[in-house]
Amino acid sequence: MFYNWSMNGINKLRIFSQHMHLEPAEETPPQLQRLAPCGQVVTGRETAVSQPDPLIYHAKMPGGKTIPLLKTLLSSACERNCNYCPFRAGRNFRRATFKPEEMAKTFMDLYRAGIAEGLFLSSGIIGGGVKTQDKLIETAGILRHKHQFRGYLHLKIMPGAEKAQVERAMQLANRLSVNLEAPNDRRLAALAPMKQFIAELVRPLQWIEEIRQSKPAHGGWNGRWPSTTTQFVVGAAGESDLELLSTAEYLYKHVRLARAYFMAFSPIHDTPLENYPAENPLRQNRLYQASFLFRDYGFDLEEMPFTEAGNLPLDTDPKLAWAQVALRDDPVEVNRAKREELLRIPGIGPKGAATILAARRRGTLRQVRDLQVIGVHTRRLKPFILLDGKRPTYQLPLF
């Protein structure tokens, strides 16, 4: 391990960038914009740089707007020994560190150039979680108050951070995240033996909700308290989907988590888990689908179609699997169903349910074509609905 303090900011960002896809943060897949070594933009099919590292990600904001988001670290040096992490202590690779003022200036250079509109900032831990959190907060404060940056800022809460630091971060950021990594303390021990599941990871999420409940929202950035997210590593500690989703459901209900991220495990060279098999990405997708059913569709954990081993089936999404059991012989009358009942029909989401409710005020929906005209996707819903008391015709699957 070594530090090269002469590196400019863009080169430091590039050192971090090769692993930043492991920190999901609002993004869709990386956009086709990169930074060449000297900092100029390379877009689309231009080939000024051979296989450049992704620095900027498409990030979808709560209102649906998409912005270019810089995802990076304050430091890739870390004293923790998480078994799956590319930044773990003792791993032999090139590391770099920003000072808070330097990080703020580097981001503002990208912001003023129109390359990045928002910042996701995490860090390895050096000198303890409290000291590292202070540096993250200092960086955020410089951005907000010295540079007058009013855009999107997502800050990571470090393991071991104090409640007062969490509250200060809430006053500066649009979103905060705490990576649980595992669904419980037993599974966490296999992934991150130095971390404490409740004291260091769950408790900060509880503090955030306590502050939201007890203090007026105008104390937050732009008059709003930040939203919260967490991340789980999937497939490296023997955990079941039931374990992961039990914890996710608790967080949605009790600390108003905005989103749980699930990252399919992929082994990293020179880590204790380097010889473990990579997890099937389809499992990651099924977990996302199930967690959205809790957050947006009113489903409970008990309604998930778990196997005897506590996992979701990989061959079908959980909403469809539930409907095949619950709705096949008890279809929903689209013209009378409440919003929450419409949301349980495969193929209908919040937007589709709102569209149907609006259309019903204008008349009765009698044919599948009536749904198609108003923009509802009908490919999956036909076996599970009634339209004016009648089942629509549909073709049974061959297999």
Image (cartoon, grey):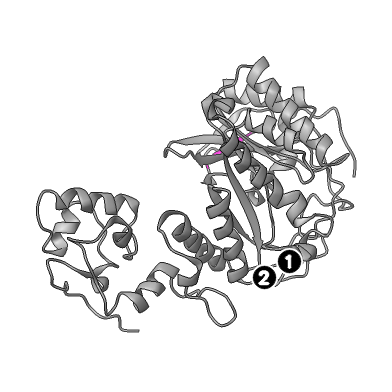
Q: What residue is drawn where x is 78% and y is 70%?
A: 275
Chain part drawn in magenta: 31-35
- Residue 36, image quadrant: top right
Nearer to the camera, 49 or 297: 297
| Label total for image | 2
Image quadrant occupied by the C terminus: bottom left
Residue extending farthest to the front is 214
Residue that label 2 marks: 239
Q: What residue is drawn where x is 54% and y is 45%?
A: 27
Is residue 7 depicted above or below 265 in this figure? above
Question: Could you give the CA–CA distance between mark 2 and mark 1, rounded to whole angstroms?
Answer: 7 Å
The kind of residue tagged 2 is: Glu
Under circle 1, the secondary element is helix
In the drawing, does residue 63 fall left or right of residue 231? Answer: left
Mark yes or no: residue 253 visible: yes
Residue that label 1 marks: 187
Instruction: Check contact, mark 2 vs mark 1: CB within 8 A.
Output: yes
Nearer to the camera, 175 or 256: 256
